[in-house]
Amino acid sequence: MRVALFALCIGLPLGVASAQIAIYPRGIVNAATSAPGGLPNGSIALGSFFSIYGNLLGPAQSSKAQSFPLSTTLANVSITVGQGTAAVKAFPYYVSAGLIDAILPSNAPTGLQPVTVTYNGTTSAVSPVNIVPVSFNFFAFSGAGFGTAAAENIDAAGAYTFNSPQASAKPGQIVVAYGTGLGAITTPDSQAAPGNAPSTPIQLFVGGVPTPVAYSGRAPGGAGEDQVNFTIPTNAPTGCWVPLYAVANGITSNVVTLSIAPNGGACSDPANPLAQPFITGKKLGTLLLLHTDTLEDLAVETPVSVQNDLLIADFANTQQPTPWPYAPLLSQPPPGSCTVIQQSGDVFTKFAASLNPENPLGVSPSFTVTGPSGATQASLPAGATIPAFLLGSAAPALGTLPNQLLLSPGNYTISAPAAGSVGAIQASVTMPASFSWTNRATLSLINRATPLTLNWTGLGATQYMAIFGGDVDLPTNSSAAFYCLAPAGASSFTVPSQILAAIPASHAHEFKFRAALYLWTTPIANGSPLQVQGIDNAYAIPAYALGKTVIFQ
């Protein structure tokens, strides 16, 4: 593909401006994902695109390389990687005051290496980066390394069309996906790369289905950018956000998504009734009545079960400025498959923060929930970033919580006055009996190199179970989580080892990581339609979430 596509996929500057040239802490990242260095795929590969975020790194007016060969200097900006006689100069492709995108030479030294940026004769302080032979990742149109893949469908006449929810691929169709990080080549990285190089073996998975690769290597006519050509398997799942990932040199790439439909064209997600309203930019809402029970039995003297009853009231305007919409809570994988979210910070608090974090609608600061044990009024905590109302909690062994729960099987009403553009709410929800996670107590050490099977009982024949697990590495501020959706009525699910490999290994020190597994009956398909003035589509969802602290090895 044209290198121009890469420009669509780069992110925005990070951090806070300072008074002098500086690379931000942990500010050198893979250009496809911006994945933190603490993640398994967070290193920079030889011959790949990488990004540098900082302050006064280049001119206020951005500049981009216009032709080959690329130079080691662009708009008076140069980048040095390594030290002494092993040092090399990277090839800047795009430079600005806050962001540089460059190609790492194939002959750069590997391992932890110092990087400096020089602009107009002034050089930044050294910033370290880990360089490896191979670390392939896909570009995504979100620019954040997840969501819709930067990919094109090829029709029978050889015409290319960007894959999107309105232009799905169909089984048997050829697709080209773009990324970076397949490794070094023998020709100059400053020139348009030849085809069939590098020859790095790569495994590909579409919706979890192993998929033969017809071509992998540099995108012809470009530099630093790789492409993977493949045919959609006939047994791949269909949907608007089918996971796509690869494994190269033992490293799992980021997980991006493809739209796949039986006949191409617009996609559909029968297990996700809010998929089409989201794609078409409707005003959406969910009322989630949720009971959580997390078994914390690691790094504690006595195991404790921490329980919470919550109401999460989320309303958002999902109008999309792009044909490639994506939001973790709404863009669910098809039943039987898994996706992964990787990011800096804490993925547990950010994964499903909102239907559309960029454009939330007003929500009443006070709700009343009435059920078999009476009525409870809950208020939104001051400064809350997630519209979650605490209805009750219990953890007797801690001695710090009220130890009073509200939710149990039965009928409930949820009410709230109008707020902003969201009308008054009056909803009825039936909490079913909870399910049982039958092998929860036996899961403590999770081997990321072997598949993980989870078993449960008590789920209805039409209900869906979601599986969520992740790890936060505090020293590197890195986190990743997988989200899988089991088929309706299933009683077990196996998370593939390739998905587990995308999660960082837990830190050796027990207070330097947070890791957990959850089973939860929260998919939107488990809910009931809800009428709210000012909202196009809304659902009331009763849910249980059973959790367990774990260690990822």
Image (cartoon, rainbow, N blue to C red):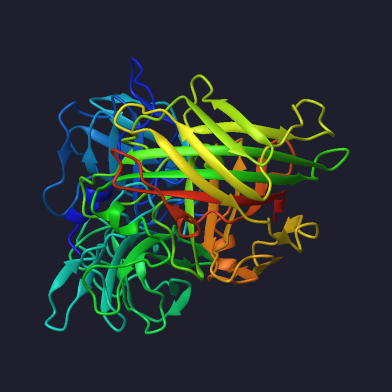
Residue 530 in view in this figure? yes
Work out which quarter of the rendered image holds the C terminus and state it.
bottom right
Q: What x and y, as percent, mark residue 309?
A: 64, 39
Looking at the image, the residue that sits furthest to the right is: 301
**Is residue 196 depicted above or below 464 in this figure?**
below
**Is residue 220 depicted above or below 146 in this figure?**
below
**Is residue 286 depicted above or below 171 in this figure?**
above
Which quarter of the figure has residue 124?
top left
Which quarter of the figure has residue 187?
bottom left
Nearest the viewer among 376 and 197 is 376
Left/right placement of residue 372 relative to residue 312 reads right
Residue 478 in view in this figure? no
Which quarter of the figure has residue 381?
top right
Q: What x and y, as percent, mark residue 499?
A: 54, 63
Nearest the viewer among 39 and 114 is 39
Nearest the viewer among 44 and 502 is 502
Q: What x and y, as percent, mark residue 205?
A: 44, 72
Left/right placement of residue 192 relative to residue 396 reads left
Q: What x and y, as percent, mark residue 244?
A: 40, 66
Work out which quarter of the rendered image holds the N terminus and state it.
bottom left
